[in-house]
Amino acid sequence: MSFYDKVYAAARQIPAGKLSTYGQLALLCGSPRASRIVGAAMLHAPEGVPCHRVIYGDGTLCCDQAFGGKEIQRQMLEAEGIAFLPDGRADLRAHLWDGTGLEE
């Protein structure tokens, strides 16, 4: 299984209402220093991978190249019950996925 395939498999397991970070997915997939590669994987993910649930480690949403922009990603996350801080970052303390249920 390629690293991208591992990333997609892990991302598919992030439940609605939870978030993961690029770094967390890299760690869960066995390459803790590969957060940028996880970002590239998310940009090219096949349909059905909930990429909108993967964000930066500080709670910032992804680049404007994906989802039609940060506002679309935010709307998708808010529809799942994700809360945002006053400065616009997602509330990782409340919504960070702990990897429960991750299957290899």
Image (tube, grey):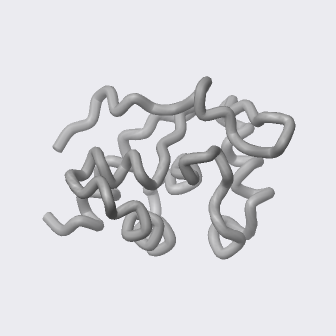
Please identify the residue farthest to the right as the structure is shown: 86
The image position of residue 35, as x and y in percent, is 40, 61
Count of numbered circles on the image: 0
In percent of width and height, residue 6 lies at 24, 57
Percent of width and height locating residue 95: 57, 29
Residue at point 83%, 43% (across, down) = 87
8 and 84: which one is in front? 84
Quadrant of the rendering where the N terminus is positioned:
bottom left
Q: Is residue 63 left or right of residue 5?
A: right
Give the position of the C terminus as an image quadrant: top left
Q: Quadrant of residue 68?
A: bottom right
User: Quick check: 24 above or below 34?
Assistant: above
**Whole-percent x and y of residue 91?**
67, 33
Horizontal arrangement in the rendering, residue 1 relative to residue 39 (left or right) = left
Q: Residue furthest front?
A: 33
Who's the residue at 32% across and 60% down the image?
33
**Residue 93 sits above or below residue 6 on the image:** above
Q: In the picture provided, is 11 more to the left or to the right than 52?
A: left
Give the farthest residue toward the left. Answer: 1
- Left or right of 94 in this view: 88: right
Residue at horizontal 28%, vertical 45%?
28
Judge whether 18 appears above or below 53 on screen. above
